[in-house]
Image (cartoon, rainbow, N blue to C red):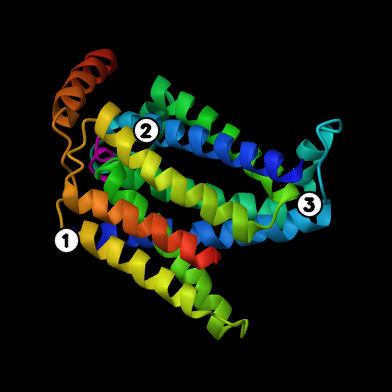
């Protein structure tokens, strides 16, 4: 039963954190360069504009879901399995999601990078 | 890329593994959480290790969102993976743990992946400017 629980939690982490990453990235692109905004308009404007962005709030909600899934997974299995497994799958899922939903130009260079990183993370757990 | 932006990426890299290790240490104290006892997972936050872990992860989140405001998601993410390399190096040189050849290979792959991405453009987002402009007009319209 325990491996099933663990892998369900890992799947939940991957889906929730990919959704969160995509939403956050979209939100922050709408907000614009935080540093420039801060120099022009000050801290309150930056914080206000970030917190008023609905994509940001949805992204945080997804991240919170991923975080609690991580806590569940960590209570069932070692961090050396959960961390790398969730992280490496999230890299590949994110590369796909960034291409589909964010229209990022995920060229061959970035695909190779995502696969290298995902493979490297798996090897770290070995 | 300015020095400040490299500092933000360094914050992304360092704070995540530190936060994760603290969480892991804390959850070992809290013990296994059963689905019948969900309140335990809320109380887990009261554990000092978990609390410190959360603080570090909040710092990570601030750096991460800042980086996402000027860089692609697929550019920032490999930077987060450098944290695992850092974790393995800490294990080897500070905790005197054994780092196996497979782990060194993993470190090499991750570093190569990060190297690949950083040689490319930071932002390739064709619709970014469009959405930025529309949000700019909406927000300046609202604030005036």
Q: Height in image: A125 above or below B108?
A: above
Say which of A65 and B67 sits in front: A65
Q: Is residue B140 visible in this depiction of the protein?
A: yes
Dot 1: chain letter: B
- Asked if both marks, 1 and 3, belong to the same chain, the answer given is yes
Spatial distance from mark 3 to mark 2, Cα to Cα? Answer: 31 Å
Given this view, does label 1 or label 3 mark the residue nearer the observer?
A: 1
In terms of secondary structure, where does tag 2 sit? helix
Residue marked by disc 2: A22
B83 left or right, relative to B7 = right
Q: Height in image: B36 above or below B24?
A: above
Q: Report the residue at 23% width, 42% height from top.
A: A36
Q: Residue B76, image x and y in percent? A: 32, 50
Residues rendered magenta in the picture: A32-37
- Determine crowd level at label 1: few under 14, some 14-19, many 20+ residues with C-alpha closer than 10 A: few
Say which of A102 and A96 sits in front: A96
Spatial distance from mark 1 to mark 2, Cα to Cα? Answer: 23 Å
Main secondary structure of the magenta stretch:
helix
Q: Report the residue at 23% width, 15% height from top.
A: B138
Q: Residue B39, image x and y in percent? A: 83, 33
What's the mark number on residue B119? 1
In terms of secondary structure, where does tag 3 sit? loop
Residue sitting farthest toward the right: B37
Q: Report the residue at 44% width, 30% height from top.
A: A19
Q: Height in image: B107 above or below A76?
A: below
Q: Report the residue at 19% width, 19% height from top.
A: B134
Residue marked by disc 3: B47
């Amino acid at each position: 039963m325990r491996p099933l629980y663990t892998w369900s939690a890992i799947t939940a982490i991957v889906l929730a954190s990919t959704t969160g990453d995509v939403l956050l990235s979209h939100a922050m692109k709408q907000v614009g360069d935080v540093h420039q905004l801060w120099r022009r308009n000050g801290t309150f404007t930056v914080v206000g504009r970030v917190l008023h962005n609905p994509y940001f709030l949805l992204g945080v909600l997804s991240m919170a879901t991923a975080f609690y899934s991580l806590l569940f997974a960590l209570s069932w299995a070692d961090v050396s399995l959960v961390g790398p497994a969730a992280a490496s799958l999230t890299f590949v899922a994110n590369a796909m999601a960034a291409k589909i939903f964010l229209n990022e130009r995920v060229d061959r260079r970035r695909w190779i990078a995502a696969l290298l990183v995902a493979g490297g993370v798996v090897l770290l757990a070995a | 890329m300015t020095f400040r932006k490299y500092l933000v990426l360094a914050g992304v890299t360092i704070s995540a593994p530190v936060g994760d290790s603290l969480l892991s240490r804390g959850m070992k104290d809290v013990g296994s959480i059963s689905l019948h006892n969900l309140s335990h997972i809320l109380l887990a936050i009261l554990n000092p290790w978990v609390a410190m872990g959360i603080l570090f992860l909040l710092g990570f989140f601030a750096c991460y969102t800042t980086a996402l405001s000027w860089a692609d998601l697929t550019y920032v993410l490999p930077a987060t993976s450098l944290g695992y390399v850092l974790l393995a190096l800490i294990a080897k040189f500070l905790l005197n743990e054994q780092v196996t050849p497979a782990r060194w290979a993993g470190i090499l792959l991750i570093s190569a992946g990060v190297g690949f991405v950083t040689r490319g453009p930071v932002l390739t987002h064709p619709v970014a400017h469009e959405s930025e402009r529309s949000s700019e007009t909406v927000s300046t319209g609202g604030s005036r």
